[in-house]
Amino acid sequence: PQQLERTVLVASAVGRIQDVTGMITAATEEQSVTTAEIAKNLTDAARNTSSIAESIAKVASTAQDTAGGAAETERAAER
């Protein structure tokens, strides 16, 4: 009888350990999916930031060209 009780207790403990292991596995998988999504979002954000920086550089260049053209027009008008 004592051996049977011990076996039942051990089996119960093993069952609880398996339950906890399953929960840890599920949480780990969910964390992996979330981490992959975060990495993708960071990559997208970096790509978008680079695109914005390129656009700003083009606008700055165009503004500089426009300022140069305006200065030439002003000089021509003063003649």
Image (cartoon, grey):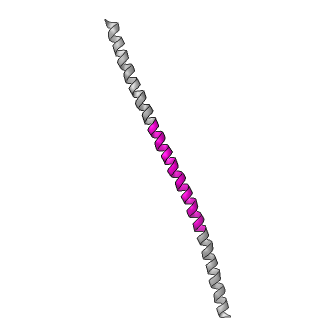
> Relative to 51, is 5 above or below?
below
| Rendered image quadrant of residue 63 | top left
**Farthest residue in the top direction?**
79
Q: What percent of the width, then of the height, locates residue 49? A: 46, 40
Asked whether 38 falls inside the magenta stretch, the response is yes
Q: Is residue 4 left or right of residue 36?
A: right
| Rendered image quadrant of residue 65 | top left
> Relative to 29, is 12 above or below?
below
- Image quadrant for the N terminus? bottom right
**Farthest residue in the bottom direction?**
1
**Farthest residue in the right direction?**
1
Q: Is residue 67 left or right of residue 1?
A: left
Q: What percent of the width, then of the height, locates residue 78? A: 32, 7
Residue beneath the point at 52% across and 51% down: 38
Q: What percent of the width, then of the height, locates residue 55? A: 45, 32
Name the chief secondary structure element in magenta: helix
Please tell me which residue lies in front, 53 or 5.
53
Residue beneath the point at 62% across and 76% down: 16
Residue beneath the point at 63% across and 88% down: 6
Q: What percent of the width, then of the height, locates residue 15? A: 64, 77
Residue beneath the point at 37% across and 20% down: 67
Q: Is residue 17 left or right of residue 40?
A: right
Which residues are drawn in magenta? 23-51
